[in-house]
Image (cartoon, rainbow, N blue to C red):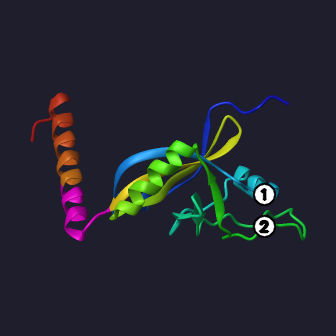
Amino acid sequence: MPREKGRKVVASNKKARHDYAILDTYEAGMALTGTEVKSLRAGRASLVDAFAQERDGELYLHAMHIPEYTQGTWTNHEPRRTRKLLLNRGELDKLIGKTREGGLTIVPLQVYFSDGWAKVEIALAKGKKSYDKRQDLAKRDADREIARVSGRRGKGMDD
């Protein structure tokens, strides 16, 4: 059977882009069990409240929910277990160093399959204040209004 090609997104964390200013993104592998992979292939996962944390020089993904595999037996996995992230040593040292500086955190943005391998896109992020969120919403609404008006003008439907 040929391997999968391309990228198939399983879960996205839309709230992370709203709550955090994304500074840098990385692609990391995950240490998973067999039933976790099968559950992910079925498109079942949630990144709500998930975060990455350093322990003993390694990064671990906490609070990511992968439901139990429905056809699994007693060997099924625990849905919210801590999962090890697989990164190059240089990337690990860089991420850990920046989080120790203060004010920065590591949040997962997406879980996907890349050429058949389960990957997670993690981001080095800084938390936004409530006024930053309001400014972003106002800017997005203004951009949407500009696009709407210019689209109407292009079609000859002036207000």
Closer-to-camera residue (85/5): 85
What's the residue at 53%, 66% (across, down)?
50
Q: What residue appears at the point 47 percent right and 59 percent down from the top-left corner?
A: 107
Please tell me which residue is depicted at 81% across the width and 55% down the height of the picture: 34
Residue denoted by label 1: 33
Q: Over which residues does the magenta segment extend?
A: 127-138
Q: Tell me the element at label 1.
A: loop
- Give how far across and how far down residue 136 sits, in percent: 23, 56
Instruction: Give the mark count.
Output: 2
**Can you give x and y, in whole percent of width and height, for residue 89 in the image?**
57, 45
- Residue in front for this viewpoint, 42 or 20: 20
Depicted 77 relative to depicted 34: above or below: below
Residue marked by disc 2? 77
Q: CA distance from mark 2 to mark 1?
A: 7 Å
Residue 22 x/y as whole percent:
35, 52
Q: Secondary structure at mark 2?
A: loop
Position of 30 relative to 50 (above/below): above
Q: Is residue 137 magenta?
A: yes
Residue nearest the observer in this picture, 52 or 99: 99
Asked whether disc 2 touches disc 1, contact meaning CB atoms under 8 Å apart, the reply is yes
Identify the residue at horizontal 19%, vertical 52% (top origin). 139
Above or below — where is 91 with respect to 99? Answer: above
- Closer to the chain start, of discs 2 and 1, is 1
Residue 6 in the magenta stretch? The answer is: no
**Pointer 1 local density, CA inside 10 Å: few below 14, some 14–19, many at least 20:** few
Instruction: Name the amino acid type tagged 1.
Output: Thr
Magenta stretch, main secondary structure class: helix
Which quadrant is the N terminus positioned in?
top right
Tag of residue 78: none
Q: Position of residue 123 (x, y in %)?
A: 44, 52
Q: Is residue 48 left or right of residue 104?
A: right
* Residue lying furthest left: 159
